[in-house]
Structures are given as structure tokens and as C-alpha cells.
Amino acid sequence: DIQLTQSPSSLSASIGDRVTITCRANQTVVIYINWYLFKPGQAPKLLIYTSKYLQSGVPSRFSGSGYGTDFTLTISSLQPEDFGTYFCQHGFSVHPLTFGRGTKVEIK
Amino acid sequence: QEQLVQSGAEVKKPGASVKVSCQASGYTFTKFYVHWVRQAPGQGPEWMGVFNPNENTTNLSQRFQGRLTMSGDMATTTVTMELSGLRSDDTGLYYCARDKRITATAPANELDLWGQGTLVTVSS
């Protein structure tokens, strides 16, 4: 199975900060990386799909990039509602889907 | 309003089976794949498999082969996941999630609508 390594595992940032989370695959997933936000007690939310496409309804402060094995999720200006745990997931269909271990974002 | 509503929390003994249901509303049930994902405490999510409600077919993770089944009921627009031979490490939150792509093509593996999660606790 493809392994996804996220960094950092946690971070604390202030409102308005730029936040960057990385996801590295141990083999190419081409462009097939998606990003989700999990919050306790809520349904998880798809933020970015196929590396860089913003899911409908997601604020434009979220963006994604990357190709091959290295991918990035960026929040351009952190807002209070952005706390939670972010996971990357590969969708490269020839392999079972896997998720990263997550990046917990806390608001300072 | 599109939504997936899951059944309530379950407590099971080791060796038992559990069924978790996921009722879809607000969209055409047979049009989109439904995945199941679980998350053990303190771990990342784990993909279990995907169900095609249009053809009643599944693609399951090999990790669960032999003890996982998925089924669908068009009349109630419900997908059900059943996991047997429960162990303590099956404890966790179980989610259903819709795939972005229609069932006429292969899944996109982009999960755009999720259920609220069902807590399954396995304990003697």
C-alpha cells in the first residue's frame, strides 16, 4: 500500500497566519491527492481534490499543489473555524486508498 | 439537501458482528459510489472498501477480506456495512462517504459527502 507521511503532526498558529501542511507519498500518486478536515462530532469535509482543485463551497484561502510524491495544503490566512485535523488521502485507483496520519491545527 | 445519515453507536463483544447503515437523501442513490472509512482512536483514517449501489458490487480492502460485506437497498436508499469476527482493534468511528464520480465510470476516490460517523466499541 502507498504510505503518506504528513508534516508537521501538529501546529499552533494565530488568526491570519499562513499555514502550510505537507504530504509525501512513498511512491508516485501522480496528481491524485485529496485533503480533508476532520472536526470532532462533525462530518469530515473535502477541501481539495486532485492536488489543486477547490471543492465547491470551500473558502478560497485554501489551496493545494504538488505532483508525483510531494504535495502541499496551504491556508493563506488562518481563521478560527479552521481548527481541526487535516488529512491527505491518495486516490490513485490502482492501489487501495490510504490516508496520512494527520496534522492537528490549533488556534493560538 | 444532500446528506448521509448513519445509524447509532454500537457496543459489541469480541467475535460478534456489527451492522452500520448509511441512508442517503437529496440525490439519486444509484448514481454515486459509497465508500466506508474507519478511524481508530488516535490513528489516521483507514479505507475499508467501496460499494456501487447501481450494480450492487463491491471492491474491498484486502485487509478486511472474508469478514466485511456491503449491501444496498434502493427502496430505502441505504447502504449497510457488516463487519464480522470483531476484535478490540476494530473499535473506532466508522464513516460512510460518497464518491464524487458517478457509477457509470470508475470511482474518483474523492469523498465529497460524509456521514456523521458511527462509534463502534468492541469490548468484553
Image: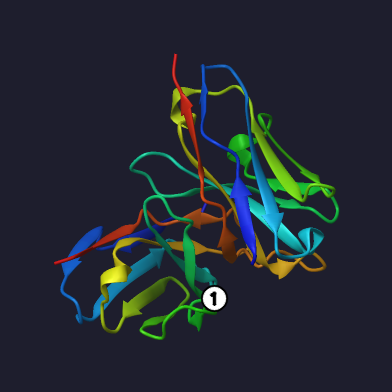
Exactly how many numbered labels are in the figure? Answer: 1
- Where is B123 relative to A48, above or below? above
Q: Nearer the viewer, residue B94 or B62?
A: B94
| Position in image of residue B1 (x %, y %) | 64, 67
**Residue B111, located in which quarter of the rendered image?**
bottom right
**Amino acid type assigned to the residue bearing label 1 in the image:** Thr
Q: Is residue B90 above or below residue B93?
A: above
Residue where numbered disc 1 is placed: A50
Q: Residue furthest front?
A: B1
Residue at x 62% of width, y 59% of height: B3
* Residue A6 to residue A72: above or below: above
Position in image of residue A24 (x %, y %): 38, 66
For the C terminus of chain A, give its image quadrant: bottom left
x, y percentage for residue A2?
Answer: 49, 56
Colour scheme in use: rainbow
Give the residue drawn at x 20%, y 64%.
A11
Please name whichever residue, B122 or B22, is drawn nearer the observer in this view of the structure: B22
Residue at disc 1, secondary structure? loop
Asked if one can make out residue A32 in the rendered structure from this viewpoint, the answer is: yes
Residue A2 showing in the rendered view: no
Is residue A24 left or right of B8 when viewed as pictured? left
Residue B34 falls left or right of residue A91: right
**Few, some or many residues within 10 Å of mark 1 (<14, 14–19, 20+):** many
Q: Position of residue B47 (x, y in %)?
A: 55, 49
**Residue nearest the viewer, comparing A37 with B28:** B28
Q: Chain of mark 1?
A: A
Which quadrant would residue B92 be assigned to in this image? top left
Q: Residue furthest top?
A: B124
Q: Is residue A30 left or right of residue B55?
A: left
